[in-house]
Image: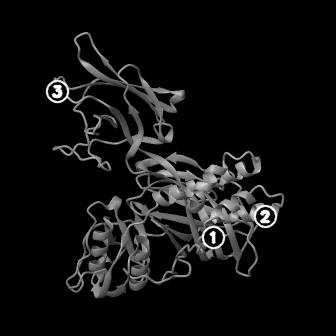
């Protein structure tokens, strides 16, 4: 059977497509920077907009302009540099997994198995009838496309929808049972080895196709707000964020609406007022939890679920959801565009690097505010040590584990990256030294907001032992990302007074 490769269909509401930016001529960026200081406000605004469109193509000129003696040019240039660099960082963090599949009359489960292999994550069937679906033959054909584009097109071909991603369930979907059932036509649906990391698809069963938008490694879908959570004269919907399982999505921080149109082409005005009262949580018998809503109703919540939904007048989104509200009683938003802002964990990278000075301690401040001081000292017997002091925010920053793969770092024979609490001591050729922990003290500072770690690392005693040259602190950190979306025909729920 020929290799299965993912069908690309341009879905009007499924993608955020930026309009092509005309390439600049040799002098355009410089000329636009000069116009940032124009006496004509409209000209300043037009230049700012065009420089923002050029993005990285204008960064060199904009960085130089940050030092301009004209305060208007300097301030606008600084704002643009921050904005463009933030966007570039977000794009890098959200880089999608690209897949390519061709399937002509192939069983659905085999298509998903091929997709799983290319994507490096398990994509399986769930719901009430996974084994009936497993043998269903489908046809999808594509070039290289992002993972979520592939998933959506397979869903279209097989009448499926996303039910569960990395343990987070779509509203209204059933939990993934991960139990093989009775096969149909000799095909049994594969079972996820690690359900908490899998992407689970289920039959749509006549349900309306969800408004969806793909941006890089993230899929955003719109769901109806549970009717029990509707507010008077406020129309609302739930945006569900589905990051690729490989993406370390931490939380959805905020949402910005740039365009919202009702069914009759009327503009919808966003409502950013917070929910008025938070529900009270009470423990009930048998390990259950009861959520007492302000209106007196009680909602039972499964405390073991990855995303316990609090359904009541004060709907509480989980870390992969965000709520959008409008000052309206409209039942649908024909167009809804904007951005979800979230936090993701970076891949392992050097967060702070110290080049050792044999005569004095060296201090640096690295990424994510990591502070590191390192020095070399010897005791009375001539034994040499590297002393390291680290200060970082324990929620934002996580040191790598010894088993983590580090870019451009070859593990030793045991598979270790040769770090100690994220700290790696190397010689001038970046070869790791075999150090031993001779002292370790950890304390909290600033009321628990920072952790302070002091490490004393013993160096090899051999006469020909390599000389320590660098200390590198490896870790990952939370970084902000922006996920643009463009949705059509989003269902809104409201409650009349």
476 sits to left or right of 275: left
**Badge 2 is on which residue?**
43
Instruction: Name the mark on residue 337.
Output: 1
Which residue of the protein is positioned furthest toward the front in this rendering?
Answer: 26
Give the vertical position of 355 relative to 219 (above or below): above
Element at badge 3? loop
386 sits to left or right of 288: left
Image x and y of residue 112, in percent: 31, 75
Distance from the alpha carbon under mark 2 to that under mark 1: 27 Å
Density class for disc 3 (Cα within 10 Å; few <14, some 14-19, many ≥20) is few
Give the vertical position of 172 relative to 446 (above or below): below
380 sits to left or right of 343: left
Q: Earlier in the sequence, mark 3 or mark 2?
A: 2
Q: Earlier in the sequence, mark 2 or mark 1?
A: 2
Image x and y of residue 33, in percent: 69, 58
**Badge 3 is on which residue?**
464
Image x and y of residue 75, in percent: 71, 49
* Nearer to the camera, 350 or 490: 350
Element at badge 2? helix
How was the colour assigned to the protein in this rendering?
A: one colour
Q: Quadrant of residue 164?
A: bottom left
Density class for disc 2 (Cα within 10 Å; few <14, some 14-19, many ≥20) is some
Distance from the alpha carbon under mark 3 to that under mark 2: 67 Å
Single out the mark in the foreground, 2 or 1. Answer: 2
């Amino acid at each position: 059977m020929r290799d299965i490769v993912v069908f690309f269909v341009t879905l009007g509401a499924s993608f955020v497509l930026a309009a092509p930016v005309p390439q600049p001529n040799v002098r355009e960026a410089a000329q636009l920077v000069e116009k940032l200081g124009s006496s004509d406000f409209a000209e300043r605004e037009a230049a700012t907009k065009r420089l923002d469109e050029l993005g990285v193509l204008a960064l060199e000129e904009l960085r130089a302009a940050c030092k301009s003696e004209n305060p208007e040019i300097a301030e606008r240039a600084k704002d643009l540099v921050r904005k463009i660099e933030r966007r570039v960082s977000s794009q890098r963090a959200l880089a999608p997994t690209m897949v390519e599949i061709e399937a002509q009359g192939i069983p659905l489960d085999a298509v998903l198995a091929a997709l799983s292999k290319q994507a490096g994550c398990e994509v399986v069937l769930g719901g009430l009838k996974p084994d009936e679906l497993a043998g269903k033959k489908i046809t999808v054909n594509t070039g290289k496309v992002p993972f979520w584009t592939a998933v959506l097109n397979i869903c279209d071909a097989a009448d499926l929808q996303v039910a569960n991603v990395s343990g987070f369930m779509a509203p209204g979907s059933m939990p993934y049972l991960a139990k093989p059932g009775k096969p149909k036509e000799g095909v049994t649906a594969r079972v996820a080895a690690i359900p908490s990391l899998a992407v689970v698809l289920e039959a749509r069963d006549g349900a309306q196709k969800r408004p969806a938008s793909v941006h890089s490694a993230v899929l955003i879908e719109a769901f109806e707000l549970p009717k029990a959570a509707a507010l008077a004269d406020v129309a609302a919907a739930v945006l569900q964020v589905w990051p690729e399982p490989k993406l370390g999505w931490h939380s959805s921080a905020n949402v910005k609406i740039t365009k919202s149109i009702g069914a009759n082409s009327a503009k919808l005005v966003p409502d950013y007022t917070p929910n008025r009262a938070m529900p009270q949580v009470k423990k009930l018998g048998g390990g259950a939890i009861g959520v007492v809503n302000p209106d007196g109703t009680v909602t039972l919540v499964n405390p073991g679920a990855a995303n316990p939904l609090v359904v009541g007048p004060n709907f509480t989104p989980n870390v992969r959801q965000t709520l959008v509200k409008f000052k309206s009683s409209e039942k649908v938003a024909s167009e809804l565009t904007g951005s979800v802002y979230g936090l993701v964990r970076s891949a392992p990278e050097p967060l702070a690097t110290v080049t050792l000075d044999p005569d004095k301690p060296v201090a640096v401040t690295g990424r994510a505010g990591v502070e590191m001081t390192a020095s070399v000292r010897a005791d009375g017997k001539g034994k040499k040590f590297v002393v390291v002091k680290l200060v970082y925010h324990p929620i934002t920053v996580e040191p790598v584990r010894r088993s983590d793969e580090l870019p451009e770092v070859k593990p030793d024979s045991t598979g270790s990256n040769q770090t100690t609490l994220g700290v790696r001591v190397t010689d001038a050729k970046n070869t790791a030294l075999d150090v031993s922990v001779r002292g370790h003290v950890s304390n909290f500072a600033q009321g628990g907001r920072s952790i302070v770690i002091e490490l004393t690392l013993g160096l090899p005693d051999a006469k020909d032992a390599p000389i320590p040259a660098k200390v590198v602190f490896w870790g990952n950190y939370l970084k902000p990302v922006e996920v643009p979306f463009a949705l059509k025909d989003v269902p809104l729920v409201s409650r009349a007074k």
